[in-house]
Image (cartoon, helix red, strand yellow):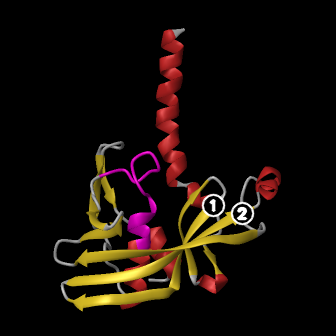
Amino acid sequence: MNRVLKAALFLLLLILPCSLVYAEDNYPDTLSNGDLVIVDGHMGTGFYADRTSVVVQKYEPPMYQIAINVVGVTFSEDYWKKHQTYIGGPSKIAWVATYQFRYNWNRKTISYFADNRWIDWNINRDNTWADGNPRIPYTAEVAFITAYKMRFFDKTMGYSPFLREYERVIPEEFYQQLGI
């Protein structure tokens, strides 16, 4: 029995990160004519970066500071039960929060403001709900692209401890979704 339990746990740990990576596939990519861009999705709530809210707070290349609102959008659980997706279903804005980011272009690093302090975002981690805040790199990238019409991370690679290999911080598909 103990062996079966270990095998089931191993399988769950193997499948769970894969399902988290593609969680956004269950949510609309954009809302409000493309102004709201999905940066994360979790348990019926889509987290959307609001491109109309971007404010450049500091422009001193290679240092930048940008603020952007993230909108929490709740979706219908009844719609989910019938269709196994939130795409096309009813939704409503539940909350709005402002995120602030600092960027160092030369080092390709970002930090974000939380709990009354600046926190360095670690490029070498798995950005899942279990390991941290998965919306940080995507929200930061939407803010930078909206402000300057260019990619910040672009092809920058980070190490995934789970996969034990390097992967792009921001997948190319995300940039294509943004049209850049």
Q: As rendered, which of 65 and 84 lies closer to the eye?
A: 65
Q: Is residue 84 above or below residue 66?
A: above
Q: Tally the numbered discs.
A: 2
Is 129 a magenta residue? Answer: yes
User: Residue 16: horizontal and vertical position, in percent?
Assistant: 52, 41
Residue occupying the point 27% across, 58% down: 122
Residue occupying the point 78% across, 68% down: 90
**What span is in magenta?**
125-139
**Of helix, strand and loop, which one carries label 2?**
strand
Task: For residue 171, say whether it is visible.
Answer: no
Residue 62 picture quarter: bottom left
Residue 45's disc number: 1
Residue occupying the point 40% across, 65% down: 136
Q: Amino acid at mark 1?
A: Thr
Q: Is residue 166 left or right of residue 31?
A: left
Q: Is residue 35 above or below residue 87?
A: below
Q: Amino acid at mark 2?
A: Phe
Q: Is residue 9 left or right of residue 42?
A: left
- N-terminal of the pair, mark 1 or mark 2, is 1
User: Residue 123: horizontal and vertical position, in percent?
Assistant: 28, 59
Residues under numbered marks 1 and 2 in contact, where contact means CB atoms less than 8 Å apart:
yes
Quadrant the C terminus occupies: bottom left
Q: Is residue 97 above or below residue 157?
A: below
